[in-house]
């Protein structure tokens, strides 16, 4: 019987078209599947928990795949790292129960969005931050970030033209951290619509610039109208930090 | 009379042959000089305080140049940033006294060396850290770092074949900081010999691996023998954080 192997993966998304396999550009999924083919000779589907977009990074992407290989489960990380590009690192591999599915079993995802607020862009780490050259009203942004918490219909915060069955999501954590000149937005939710985090950030930045009032946030949420929310913040600032699962079913601990 | 303009510069050294102009690869100095030529039509020497090597980064490189241009001094940063590559950012520009010289006037330099200690390399930020896949005895390294403090002949800690007139330097600050999985080494000195910081780090890492005993540090310093010190740590972990000048003569404050 095939073993089900779970991977935890860190990657720099700068040079990829995103997580998912596609025709016109390399993807993280493809690199991992090709790496596994080199190691095992098997054509395998590597199923990821979050379909990160082009330019989006991950520190804690979770994926799983099935294999007949005799490679010990915990050795897949080392073995894969020897055959995949340096900007993708498998930081953990282990066998999990046969019914584990990285995406369907995920209970929550933690994304971090990183900004740098100063007149000049960053030279060091420029691929990991959204550069904002003007001062922001961070207190108003903090107020607005609070309003994302709880269960809401996030229809206004998904990319126009998306066709999600339900647009209701629950946000468990939504907080800004200011470490001059860096501003971080951390958000944990049971799921995210297409471009949702980036539109939330774009809206927060618009609030910080005074282009949207905090008092309008409720209207935007209620309207379900994408045009009322802020612009989509650039991909490079976004990082999938962690995917949470039921402690009972998996080895991943802590919902901090 | 020409104005003397001082720049503070941040750069990602990954794609450069170093600070200094050279034949076979692009340099930070050349990019700045070409940028100034585009702005002013003048062929200018941009004199840097620290000649960082290929792959070495800077957050606080200081440089100065003379110009007849009518561009206001504080606008040079913005103007230069519009014509130089994104991996070099001028974060400050201002006029200083005509006799200011970025290198000769420098009283001290602060370098930070960044390491990551874990089995797998970094994907995110991989160009800014030296990856060490084995555990280190950090306490012994801390002890050894203390021994660099003060005035010593650092002949054993300069690249073989160097021809510095004097190899005596004074180290004001020498400290390791462990933020699992990151290890930082901060060092402030009145000057550094060629490759000195990288050989100091290579020696500390050898001590952390148990290949050199802390008790041998004094011997190594006294010997003046490059072969007794550890290997030269890779360039990518090194960053010139700040250059210090006399407060009386310049606007730069604090020796923190």
Image: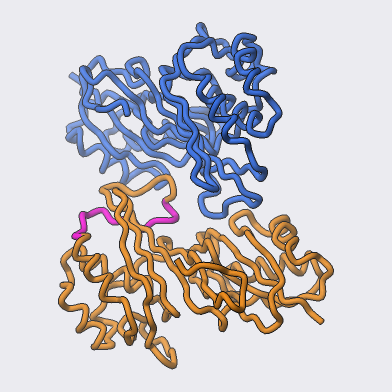
Chain colours: A orange, B blue
Residue furthest out toward the bottom? A165
Q: Quadrant of residue B242?
A: top left
Q: Is residue B26 something one can see in this rendering?
A: no
| Residue depicted at 24% across the width and 23% down the height | B4
**Residue B20 forms part of the magenta stretch:** no
| Residue depicted at 38% across the width and 25% down the height | B48
**Residue A130 forms part of the magenta stretch:** yes
What x and y, as percent, mark residue B94?
Answer: 22, 31
Q: Is residue A33 something one can see in this rendering?
A: yes
What x and y, as percent, mark residue A243?
Answer: 52, 71
> Is residue A167 depicted above or below B107 in this figure?
below
| Residue depicted at 41% across the width and 91% down the height | A166
| Residue depicted at 65% across the width and 42% down the height | B135
State which quarter of the image contains the N terminus of chain A: bottom right
What x and y, as percent, mark residue B250?
Answer: 23, 22
State which quarter of the image contains the C terminus of chain A: bottom left
In magenta, the rendered stretch is A126-137
Residue furthest out toward the right? A70
Q: Quadrant of residue B85?
A: top left
A216 or B23, which is in the foreground?
Answer: A216
């Amino acid at each position: 019987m095939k073993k089900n192997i779970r991977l935890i993966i860190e990657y720099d998304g700068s040079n990829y078209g995103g997580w998912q396999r596609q025709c016109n550009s390399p993807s993280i999924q493809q690199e991992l599947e090709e790496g596994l083919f080199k190691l095992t000779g098997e054509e395998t589907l590597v199923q990821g928990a979050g379909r990160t977009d082009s330019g989006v990074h991950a520190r804690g992407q979770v994926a799983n795949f099935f294999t007949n290989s005799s490679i010990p489960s915990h050795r897949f990380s080392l073995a894969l790292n020897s055959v995949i590009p340096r900007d993708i690192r498998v930081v953990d591999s282990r066998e999990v129960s046969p019914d584990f599915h990285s995406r369907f079993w995920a209970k929550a995802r933690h994304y971090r969005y990183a900004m740098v607020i100063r007149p000049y862009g960053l030279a060091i780490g420029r691929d990991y931050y959204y550069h904002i050259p003007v001062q922001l009203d961070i207190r108003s942004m903090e107020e607005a970030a609070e309003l994302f918490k709880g269960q809401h219909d996030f229809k206004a915060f998904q990319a126009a033209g998306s066709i999600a069955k339900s647009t209701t999501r629950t946000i468990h954590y939504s907080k800004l951290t200011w470490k001059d000149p860096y501003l971080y937005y951390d958000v944990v939710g049971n799921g995210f619509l297409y471009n949702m985090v980036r539109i939330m950030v774009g809206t927060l930045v618009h609030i910080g610039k005074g282009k949207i009032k905090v008092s309008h946030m409720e209207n935007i949420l209620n309207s379900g109208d994408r045009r009322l929310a802020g612009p989509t913040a650039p991909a490079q600032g976004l990082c999938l930090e962690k995917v949470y699962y039921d402690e009972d079913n998996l080895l991943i601990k802590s919902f901090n």
